Amino acid sequence: MIGIGIIGAGHFGAVHARAIAATQGLRVAAICREDAAAARVFAHEHGGHAHTDWRAVLDDSAVDAVVIATPHHLHAEMAVAAAQAGKHVLLEKPMAPTLAECDAINAAVAKVGVKLMVGHVMHFARPCLVAREILDGGTLGRPVLGSSWMIKLWMEANRRPWHLSHSSGGGMLMTAGIHALDRLVWLMGGEVATVSALSGALFHQQEADDSALMLLRFTDGRIGQVASVGYRDGAVGFAMDLVCEGGTLRIDFEHGVSIGRGGNWTPIAHSADPDWMQRAVEAEWRAMAAAIEANAPVPVDGTYARHLIACLDAAGRANAERREITLARPG
């Protein structure tokens, strides 16, 4: 039985706790939350020793691996320390706010040899997996152009002040729009070379963005666009289109996947899942367990996750400098 420590036993920490409980061979061994009373309540519900200091989770001999679900600016210090303590790491997205921090995490993991998976949940969500299977089948040919969007309420119940600053949260694009970016880069199946972007706080009074548009140019010349919008009021738009050599592919998290040919859309049966988030996190943990027990490769490694942060870093510079920016390479 693999003992899991939850560092950041809050809203999404509970999602992970339920997923761990649903995964054979895993158990919650320890949890951490700064509020001692809340930590005790969480541990009573989900199991494990309750701690108020994340370092105590790393010192707990019952813990073999940790999930880090804390504010973004805390990821690097915690992930590096976890690796140095010999703990495997499932690190919530985004990997870290800066490229230097991503490089530090990857270096620490490589030095010690523990497993690192970054929690880009799109790689485990049913609509995306159905789309990936269709693309891998080759009937539509290669994606040539992609458009991916995340349009949602920004000030939802779990929004916190740290989300609103550049240094700690990174705003809507770093927090939620990154899902649209990840989905596009992964399903296009290529490496991004340059980024252009426009961003700003268009709906709310905050330091970091609540809205952004990105244009991506892949190394082989293919192109894509990402829309990240955290509105004041509206309705959710969470979907993407891929225009392939032999047809179009639409991924919609409400309606599922459809193939476009001959001027018509054909829905793919059973390609939507109302409870996709919880099921996707459970699939993450099954993959993480296989990586630990059987030394299997993780589906989303630190190199890929760093590439997404390089895209966001380039987007920030592109908006500030009003020009197309070439992605920064690992140092």
Image: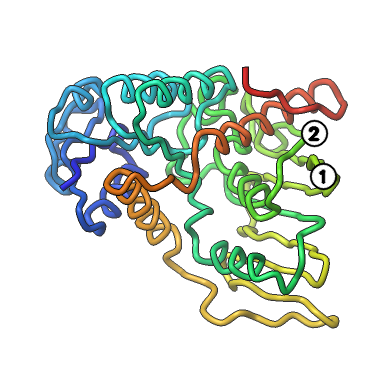
- Would residue 138 appear left or right of 99 to someone viewing this image? right
Q: Which structural element holds mark 2?
A: strand
User: For this rendering, which residue is in front, 259 or 256?
Assistant: 259
Q: Is residue 215 at all visible to an observer of this figure?
A: no
Quadrant of the rendering where the C terminus is positioned? top right
Q: Nearer the viewer, mark 2 or mark 1?
A: 1
Residue 51, above or below 263: above
- Would residue 285 appear left or right of 217 to someone viewing this image? left
Residue 220's disc is: 1
Q: Is residue 54 at all visible to an observer of this figure?
A: yes
Instruction: Give the residue at the far front of this rendering.
Output: 295
Mark nearer the N terminus (2 vs 1): 2
Residue 252, above or below 172: below
- Would residue 126 appear left or right of 136 to someone viewing this image? left
Q: Quadrant of residue 234?
A: bottom right
The spot of residue 193 in percent (x, y) is 78, 35
> Distance of mark 2 from mark 1, alpha carbons?
11 Å
User: For this rendering, which residue is in front, 5 or 40?
Assistant: 5
The spot of residue 297 in percent (x, y) is 43, 45
Q: Quadrant of residue 92?
A: top left
Q: Residue at x 79, y 82 (%)?
A: 264
The kind of residue tagged 1 is: Asp
Q: Residue at x 15, y 32 (%)?
A: 50
Q: Residue at x 43, y 40 (%)?
A: 117
Q: Which structural element holds mark 1?
A: loop
User: Which residue lies under the disc numbered 2?
Assistant: 194
Residue 297's disc is: none
The spot of residue 175 in percent (x, y) is 55, 38
What is the crowding at mark 1: few (fewer than 14 residues within 10 Å), some, or many (at least 20)?
Answer: few
